[in-house]
Image: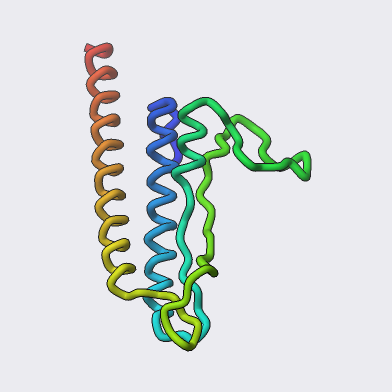
């Protein structure tokens, strides 16, 4: 989604949140695809804690710079990460995917993505309105 920098910080946050929800949707679909795979452990995406830290101005949380190229530039530290739930087991074969829980989570993810897309569209309309008023 290049070009959202015209929308400033809000556009950037919406872009990252949409990217995180897209990744979350893929991960949850992967969980569903592996519902019958012995030993498979469900995965999820963590993003909200990083986003909250960004919004509160705390920048990077729990990240360590190991190379000069890491965490450089003007970008934000608010990035999604995939985590595996190794704490639980649903069945004797070690798999911990609950199909009903994953279906609900997948639906919630799709709804959140749609809401974010609508907010981004609203911001773009606002920007177009400002531009058209200045041109007139």
- Tell me: residue 123, above or below residue 114: above
Point 35% across, 74% down: residue: 98
Q: Quadrant of the N terminus?
A: top left
- Tell me: residue 8, above or below residue 107: above
- Tell me: residue 136, above or below residue 63: above
- Tell me: residue 125, above or below residue 103: above
Residue 6 is at least partly visible in this image:
no
Q: Nearer the viewer, residue 6 or 54?
A: 54
Q: Position of residue 134 (x, y in %)?
A: 27, 11
Point 40% across, 43% down: residue: 17
Q: Which quadrant holds residue 33?
A: bottom left
Q: Is residue 126 left or right of residue 25?
A: left
Give the number of callouts: 0
Q: Position of residue 103 (x, y in %)?
A: 28, 68
Colour setup of the view: rainbow
Q: Which quadrant holds residue 58?
A: top right
Point 73% across, 41% down: residue: 65
Point 50% across, 79% down: residue: 40
Q: Quadrant of the C terminus?
A: top left
Q: Position of residue 105 (x, y in %)?
A: 31, 61
Q: Is residue 134 left or right of residue 89?
A: left
Check the image and name the residue furthest to the right: 67
Residue 68 is at least partly visible in this image:
yes
Q: Nearer the viewer, residue 37 or 92?
A: 92
Q: Position of residue 135 (x, y in %)?
A: 26, 13
């Amino acid at each position: 989604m290049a070009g959202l920098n015209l929308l400033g910080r809000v556009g950037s946050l919406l872009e990252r949140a949409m990217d995180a929800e897209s990744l979350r949707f893929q991960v949850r679909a992967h969980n569903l695809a592996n519902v019958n795979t012995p030993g498979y452990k469900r995965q999820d995406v963590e993003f909200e804690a990083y986003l909250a830290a960004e919004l509160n101005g705390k920048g990077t949380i729990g990240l360590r710079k190991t190379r000069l190229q890491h965490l450089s530039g003007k970008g934000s530290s608010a990035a999604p990460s995939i985590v595996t739930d190794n704490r639980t087991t649903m069945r004797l074969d070690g798999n911990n995917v609950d199909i009903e829980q994953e279906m609900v989570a997948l639906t919630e993810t799709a709804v959140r993505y749609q809401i974010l897309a609508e907010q981004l569209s609203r911001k773009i309309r606002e920007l177009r309105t400002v531009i058209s008023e200045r041109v007139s």
